[in-house]
Image: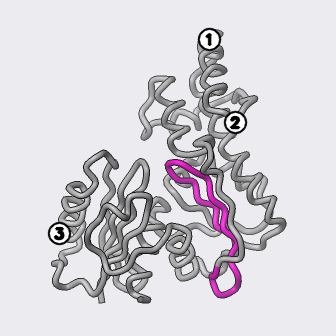
């Protein structure tokens, strides 16, 4: 049976079609102000890509910060629940999830059955989030899709002394005026995000197995430093980690 999962994030909206643990199709678009219209178009696109009609869907799960703006869906779940659903089924060995999304860094400790033991989130400030990286990259003249490629070219990364976006941007301008290479600046900024992930992971103590989700999990310049410092074995999410919440939403619809 086929299920649709929708995750309306602060920066991107994602939709997936799942059949069991198989990903049939996925679509990602920018989140703007017209969520209802965007989601309708997104759903049409992902269903066409999967070769599935709406009538063939056994259920629809919705999650994310804009979930309440969608007037259809059989199941609505918070993002923590959806992440746990996806990870417990697709990365069953993981007992720690580190998720870096558009507005926050979230760490979730799981029990052996995939239930939530505890979690922490830095949602009071966008520092360390995808938005933080996007803003800093834009200040250097790069788009979101270019940041990781720029940072990995660094030969001498410049450490960032603050985790506050306002102060980091001030530091960034100073480095640019001093002639520091953009790649070295960006690498330092990416490492600052990794430090937030590491700090959250360490607060949970030693964990045997962990995975990384969220759009920023695709940035080697962020995840590389994090994996070097976090104790335990890393297990890759089997699909695009940016889709983890949407996949979990589809799975939640299946479980309902």
Along the viewing direction, whichever of 95 and 223 lies nearer the viewer: 95
Q: Are marks 3 and 1 in contact (CB under 8 Å)?
A: no
According to the picture, the residue beneath numbered tag 3 turns out to be: 48
Quadrant placement of the N terminus: bottom left
Q: Is residue 252 magenta?
A: no
Magenta residues (range): 96-115
User: Closer to us: mark 2 or mark 1?
Assistant: 2
Q: Residue furthest right?
A: 205
- Left or right of 61 on screen, residue 234: right
The span from disc 3 to disc 1 (Cα, nearest Å) is 49 Å
Total numbered badges shown on the rendered structure: 3
Image coordinates for residue 61, horizontal then vertical, percent: 36, 76
Q: Residue at x 30, y 70 (%)?
A: 25
Q: Residue at x 81, y 59 (%)?
A: 202
According to the picture, the residue beneath numbered tag 1 turns out to be: 179
Mark 3 or mark 1: name the one nearer the start of the chain: 3
The span from disc 2 to disc 1 (Cα, nearest Å) is 22 Å
For label 3, the crowd category at 10 Å Cα-Cα, with few meaning under 14, some 14 to 19 and many 20 or more, is: few
To which quarter of the image does residue 175 belong?
top right
Q: Is residue 234 above or below residue 182?
A: below
Image coordinates for residue 9, horizontal then vertical, percent: 42, 55
Q: Residue at x 47, y 67 (%)?
A: 245
Q: Is residue 148 above or below residue 35?
A: above
């Amino acid at each position: 049976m086929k299920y649709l999962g929708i995750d309306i994030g602060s920066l991107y909206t994602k939709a997936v079609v799942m059949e069991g643990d198989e990903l049939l199709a996925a679509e990602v678009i920018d989140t703007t102000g017209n969520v209802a219209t965007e989601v309708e178009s997104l759903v049409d696109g992902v269903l066409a890509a999967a070769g599935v009609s709406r009538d063939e869907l056994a259920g629809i799960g919705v999650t994310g910060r804009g979930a309440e703006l969608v007037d259809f869906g059989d199941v609505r779940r918070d993002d923590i629940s959806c992440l746990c659903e996806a990870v417990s089924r697709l990365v069953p060995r993981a007992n720690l999830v580190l998720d870096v999304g558009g507005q926050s860094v979230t760490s979730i400790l799981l029990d052996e059955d995939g239930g939530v033991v505890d979690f922490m989130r830095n949602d009071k400030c966008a520092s360390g989030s995808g938005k933080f990286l996007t803003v800093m990259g834009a200040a250097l003249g790069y788009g979101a899709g270019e940041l990781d490629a720029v940072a990995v070219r660094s030969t001498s990364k410049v450490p960032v002394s603050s985790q506050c976006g306002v102060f980091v941007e001030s530091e960034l301008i100073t480095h640019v005026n001093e002639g520091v290479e953009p790649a070295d600046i960006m690498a330092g900024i990416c490492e600052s995000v990794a430090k937030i992930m590491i700090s959250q992971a360490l607060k949970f103590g030693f964990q045997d197995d962990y995975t990384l989700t969220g759009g920023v999990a695709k940035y080697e310049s962020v995840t590389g430093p994090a994996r070097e410092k976090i104790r335990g074995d890393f297990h890759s999410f089997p699909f695009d980690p940016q889709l983890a919440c949407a996949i979990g939403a589809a799975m939640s619809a299946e479980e309902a």
